[in-house]
Image (spheres, helix red, strand yellow):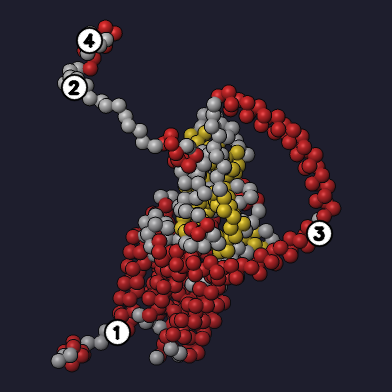
Amino acid sequence: MSPLVWLGVPAIASLAASLILATPIRVAGLQAPEPVFALVPAFAWAMARPSIFPPIVLVGLGLALDLLWGGPLGLWPTCLLGAYALVFAARRILSGQDVLGLFAWYAAACATAMTVGLALMSLRAGHVPSLFGAAAQFAVTLVLYPFAWRLIERYEASEIRYR
Amino acid sequence: MSLRDGPLGEIKPPLIWLAGVALIAAMALGVGLFVTDGQRGQTFAGLRRAADSLASPAGAVLSAPVRWTGDIVGDIGDYLRAGSQNRDLRAELAAARTWRDQAVALRHENERLRGLLGIATAPAMPMISADTVLDARGPFSNSRLADAGADQGITEGNPVLSEHGLVGRITGVGGRVSRVMLLTDVESRLPVLLVRTNGRAILTGDGGPNPALAYLRTHDALREGDRVLTSGDGGVAPRGLPVGTAVRGFGGVWRVALDADAAPIDFVRVLIFKDFSQLAQPADLAPRELPSTATEAPEAPVTLVPAPSPAAKAPAP
């Protein structure tokens, strides 16, 4: 599996999913949630193997999210890299974990990303953004864990860590 | 001799070190971009315009089926509720006729009083209608992409309304696309007027559905349901645009339930409002030549100068 495939395909897929969810969808009169799809590859790449490419791709992916969502540039690259850094630092502990153990670490990675975002936007805006809004986005991003688990399984099956 | 052939060529840093260095460098880049990106829409404006211009057609294509589905569901719902809607509309019509008569009488009285006082009314401002094609609704950014831009005369700062009330303002403009920062955005600030008390406040977005009323300044205590309008202070928006009603949030903080939340913000109207100079006669604002401030004896104290007598002003024979 070439870097173009194990990095490029999940990056494009998460960006496409973000674009689709950015349409003004309403379910039963309520706005559809806005999960952060890019946290799925950020988690899986840190688990897959150490490489210089994932941080670079995460910067690009984060910038694309900033431009798509109209936020300040650099916000989502830093959030995604914060989540990636946590998993990257703990990857020895994570190897061999079962589904539930990895889910706990995925939740920790998502929480790190949201905390970094809250801290940066608090500094910028001069007040803390809505914790309810951050908690809602955190919750809907947790629902994406099966995609992260499936991606990690694919990486293990193709043995990219030995290439 | 190349570097690879020398003694340094034997050095092979572990892959994990290289990955760590790449991670630190990428984080530094991310933080650097965040710090250098000043007021939203101003820095990297060209990049944002290009991205919005690319995303707008994709959003229009993707949102079309969503809109069609919504229309079909709405039509079915209207058909099923036709009987009860008819009754409600008859009741509303009866009430509206009473209000219409009062409004006509008040309008005549208002016009007469304005004529007596010599007050000039604000001229009508042009509006541009647009569809919203993309929607960011996360905790850190609340904005929409509208499919009208500089080609239609929209500029940064223009207020944006739905059919119910103020939605936000334009923060970025491309040729046929513009970015609308919603009132709920973390960085949104808007001076507002509390109608009953004539108080003032700054409507402060925080990413939640109900922006807070900060710097609240009013003589009478605020009540639930008090109307909130734009105050016009600072020239951000013209005075009197409907914003919402006051509600008390968690911790006793006063917030505003936005009028614009009454229905989906699929269509918006962009008010072509620049600043208050648009509301005045240009001739009145033109620079005038002021009288000279020079005196005959500038060093003399002003309080000791005697007032000139009429005889002194008379020309010498």
Protein chain holding label 2: B
Q: Residues within 10 Å of mark 1 (few under 14, many from 20)?
A: few
Residue B115 image point, x, y percent: 59, 26
Does the rendering let one see residue A131? Answer: no
* SS category of the residue bearing label 2: loop
Contact check, label 4 and label 1, Cβ < 8 Å? no
Q: Earlier in the sequence, mark 4 or mark 1?
A: 1
Image depth: mark 4 or mark 1 in front: 4
Amino acid type of disc 4?
A: Ala
Q: Earlier in the sequence, mark 2 or mark 3?
A: 3
Give me the residue at 69% from left, 66% from top.
B68
Outermost residue to the front = B317
Q: Which residue is mark 1?
A: B14
Q: Which residue is mark 4?
A: B316
Q: Residues within 10 Å of mark 2 (few under 14, many from 20)?
A: few
Q: Which residue is mark 3?
A: B79
Image depth: mark 4 or mark 2 in front: 4
Amino acid type of disc 3?
A: Tyr
Outermost residue to the top = B311
Outermost residue to the left = B1
Protein chain holding label 4: B
Give me the residue at 60% from left, 63% from top.
A24
- In front: B20, or B301? B301
Image depth: mark 1 or mark 2 in front: 2
Amino acid type of disc 2?
A: Pro
Image depth: mark 3 or mark 1 in front: 3
Give me the residue at 37% from left, 59% from top.
B43
In which quadrant of the rendered image does the N terminus of chain B lie?
Answer: bottom left
Residue B298's label in the rendered image is: 2
* SS category of the residue bearing label 3: helix
